[in-house]
Amino acid sequence: MSTATHTDFTFRAFAEDRPGPVWQHHFKRLWPAYKRWFLRYGERDRPTYFESARALKHYMPEFVPIFEAMVDLAGGGDHAARFLSQYCPPPLFRGCSQAIYDVEESVLVRSYDYSPFVFDGLLMRSRFGERQVIAMLDCMSGVLDGINSDGLAVSMSFGGREEFGEGFGISLLLRYLLEFAGDVSEACELIQRIPVQGAYNIMLLDREANFETVEIAPGCDPVRVGHRVATNHQANSSWPLYEEKVFTHARGKHLQNLVAAREHGSYAFTREFLQFPLYQTRFAKGFGTLYNAAFYPGRNACEYFWPHNQWELSFDHFSDREYDVAFIDPDGFPDNSESYGEVYTSKPLPVLQF
């Protein structure tokens, strides 16, 4: 007898030039769960507001006015401000596959593999500064991936290292790149000077089809590796339990073969992300594909897509919308959602339960 069960989720897209009432509405809706996650190990385990604000002003001074506007909308509370700074947040172990492909046109494609209970599901078109940005929000101040109006696209995947250190959450760095970098070269310069809390593979593609993959890890200098494929390991990473459970090497090899063969057009290549081993359904264990995204810097467009739906978006054609999806896990969901995502780690994984 099948044990398959599902959990319902709603993706939402909205446009707001700067954080305003719509952003504020979603923050208030998500904040109780985020606060439980942020303080999961106790208040003393998180940096103080002074430490967080000082780090932000030192490493990302241009972002401070945006941060302050968000804090005001969040009510000006100490915990909310520390959370939105994303300085030394609780660790998160994400999945994800990424690739850059250049048949017909250059495209950056990514899957986002994680638990639906640890996810905002908010896509925002904004204009915080001189550039417009379309990006999937994370922790409300950061993004998981996106593209800006200069034609820079960015995404990330977890780098497969168990160690975490002092630095910012990866999604705040990605937001910073989209706001203040116009091409791959400028983005790489910013990455060099900003410490990040965990190990990640950052993938970049710009309007001129320049691309780069940068491996970052706490306490290490960023390394530009120039790969067209990145999953959940790095050249010097060694976490066998995690690597085995998320099939990082198998997914990476599969993508490398697809990229090298060059048998697909760009659109057909993106749809390979809807097939196993790239598409995953172990949602209850924190490793299901929540969405896929494709970024086309040459025409300043992007697409977010699922097995049964797709959003085609650009800066000239963007509208508010919602999409209700049922994430079906063939093995079923456990009664205690606090266990979601923990099976791939040798230590407890902090989770949000919405």
Image (tube, rainbow, N blue to C red):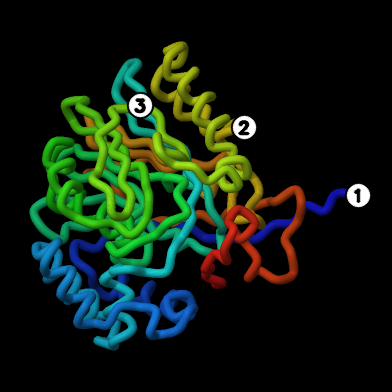
Quadrant of res 295? top left
Secondary structure of the residue carrying numbered label 3: loop
Residue 22 point in image, percent of width and height: 31, 71
Mark 3 vs 2, N-terminal side? 3
Q: Mark 3 points at which residue?
A: 228
- Image point (37%, 50%), residue name: 199
Residue 33 point in image, percent of width and height: 49, 77
Residue at mark 3 to residue at mark 1: CA–CA distance: 42 Å
Q: In this view, does 76 lie to the left or right of 92?
A: left
Secondary structure of the residue carrying numbered label 2: loop
Instruction: Indicate whether 252 appears above or below 102.
Output: below
- Image point (36%, 75%), residue name: 27
Q: Mark 1 points at which residue?
A: 1
Mark 2 vs 1, N-terminal side? 1
Residue at mark 3 to residue at mark 2: CA–CA distance: 19 Å
Residue 308 seen in this snapshot = no
